[in-house]
Amino acid sequence: MPGPGRARRRRSRERGSFTAELAAGLPALMLLLLAGLTAVDAVTTRAACLDAAREAALAAARGGSGSVAGARYAPAGAEVAVSVAGDRVTASVRVPVRTFGARLPGLTVSGVAVAAVEPGLPGPVP
């Protein structure tokens, strides 16, 4: 049966091990946190791009200005492009996403929507 002195010696050898493990793992944890925040921002920005592209395509298909409608709903700094091919209108919205952390690479997200031209209305306006 081990005596009380032996248990104390074992505890004294392990003293500070949590601090060392925390110091070694904290940078990796921070990198994962920054990457996670960037991913959440990219997903919400992509949803906004899809909404803007859908509004632009529908506005252009109904005879309105698709670029103006898309710019109204698009995130700040977004590019809105509307094209007409036959009886279809395609709208595309692209925007760069800000990354949390200076060393992470930049991202660009986009959203594309297609709408059919409404019959009986004036022609689509990009």
Image (cartoon, rainbow, N blue to C red):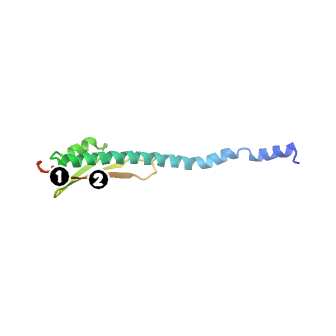
Mark 1 burial class by Cα count in 10 Å: few <14, some 14-19, many 20+: many
Tag 2's secondary structure?
A: strand
Closer to the camera in the image, 62 or 65: 62
Closer to the camera in the image, 117 or 16: 117
Q: Position of residue 87 (x, y in %)?
A: 17, 56
Which residue reaches farthest bottom?
86
Q: Position of residue 80 (x, y in %)?
A: 25, 49
Residue at point 43% right, 48% down? 39
**Of label 1 and label 2, which has the lower sequence position?**
2
Which residue reaches farthest front?
119
Closer to the camera in the image, 33 or 115: 115
Q: On residue 28, which mark appears?
A: none
Tag 1's secondary structure?
A: loop
Query: Identity of the amino acid at label 1?
Result: Val
Q: Position of residue 101 (x, y in %)?
A: 46, 47
Closer to the camera in the image, 83 or 105: 83
**Where, by quadrant of the figure, is residue 70 drawn?**
top left
Task: Residue under label 1, please give it.
Answer: 117
74 with respect to 38 (left or right): left
Rounded to the nearest angstrom, the CA distance separating label 1 from label 2 is: 16 Å
41 with respect to 77 (left or right): right
Query: Identity of the amino acid at label 2?
Result: Val
Task: Residue under label 2, please give it.
Answer: 112
**Where, by quadrant of the figure, is residue 83 drawn?**
bottom left
Q: Nearer the viewer, mark 1 or mark 2?
A: 1
45 with respect to 73 (left or right): right
Residue at point 29% right, 53% down? 112
Which residue reaches farthest top?
72
Q: Position of residue 78 (x, y in %)?
A: 29, 47
Residue at point 82% right, 45% down? 7
